[in-house]
Amino acid sequence: MAALAGIGSCCSTLSSTSHFRTSWLKFETRTHGGGTILGTSYRRRTLAIRAKVNFVTAEEAKELIAVDGYTVVDVRDKSQFERAHIKSCHHVPLFIANEDNDPGTIIKRTLHNNFSGLFYGLPFTKPNPEFVQSVKSQFSPQSKLLLVCQEGLRSTAAANKLEQAGFENIACITSGLQSVKPGAFDSVGSTELQNAGKAGLVTVQGKISAVLGTVLICAYLFITFFPDQAEKILQIFQTT
């Protein structure tokens, strides 16, 4: 029996195009340590299949849910999820609150809370070490999962983690929930899905600007049409 020629690894790629995006399946054959049969050495080969992530628009995402049976998994932090989320979705955060109390973390948290936390309402977080395991405990690798976040970055990172863990049917909304039109999905929360990322002082900045603008306009009109009264009021302030 002739010895088998040494085989390292080989791969081939097949594509299948749907009305959403082109999805790719990558077939890889890998060799592993084997043994000897009748004086001839051999090595075992296994077949690994990796499916690329499918990026879709909000309208396409609705069809994935309604027609193809995809389940929505929200990977945002707790605060954004509570402000607004798609009805009946599963919440598995990619980042969790960082409550560590080592000196370095305390300094970083203080700086964060005085800037990003104050102005944008962003929580101080750290990667969720149980993210992949939490998803695995709820879904099989063959499950059809639509991952969502606010801007599309966290869902992409989460999709990569799940893809590496063997999940085969992963989709993400391009640009996240911030690109979703009002009423596009049935939602739960105190605001619209596209506004769930807005918090902190930036949410009242527009209102403050509107009030100040109204006051300045009224003052200008008063001075223009009632100059004598305006001058008397000004003199009162100067004498006090």
Image (spheres, helix red, strand yellow):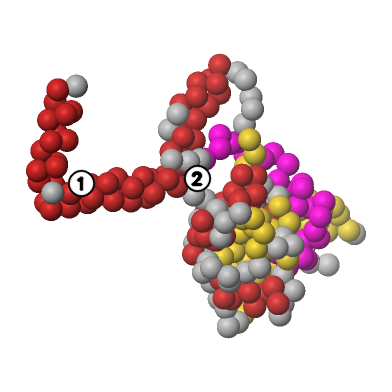
Badge 2 density bin: few <14, some 14–19, many ≥20, Cα 10 Å = some
Residue type for callout 2: Ala
**C-alpha distance separating marks 1 and 2:** 31 Å
What range is drawn magenta here? 122-146
Q: Quadrant of residue 105?
A: top right
Amino acid bearing label 1: Ala
User: Where's the N terminus, which quadrant?
Assistant: bottom right
Query: Who comes first in sequence, dot 1 or dot 2?
Result: 2
Choose mark 1 or mark 2, whichever is in front.
Answer: 1
Indicate left or right for 4 with 205 as reference: right
Quarter that holds the C terminus: top left
Residue 110, percent from left and from top:
50, 24
Residue closest to the eye, 170 or 63: 63
In the picture provided, is 13 more to the left or to the right than 181?
A: right
Q: Horizontal and vertical percent for residue 72?
A: 69, 63
* Residue 128 magenta-highlighted: yes
- Say which residue label 1 marks: 219
Whole-percent x, y for residue 229 in the image: 14, 42
Which labelled disc corresponds to residue 199? 2
Q: Residue furthest right?
A: 38
The image shows a total of numbered marks equal to 2
Q: CB of mark 1 within 8 Å of CB of mark 2?
A: no
Residue 216 in view (yes/no): yes
Residue 70 image-quadrant placement: bottom right
Quick one: 203 or 111, which is closer to the camera? 203
179, above or below 214, in the image: below
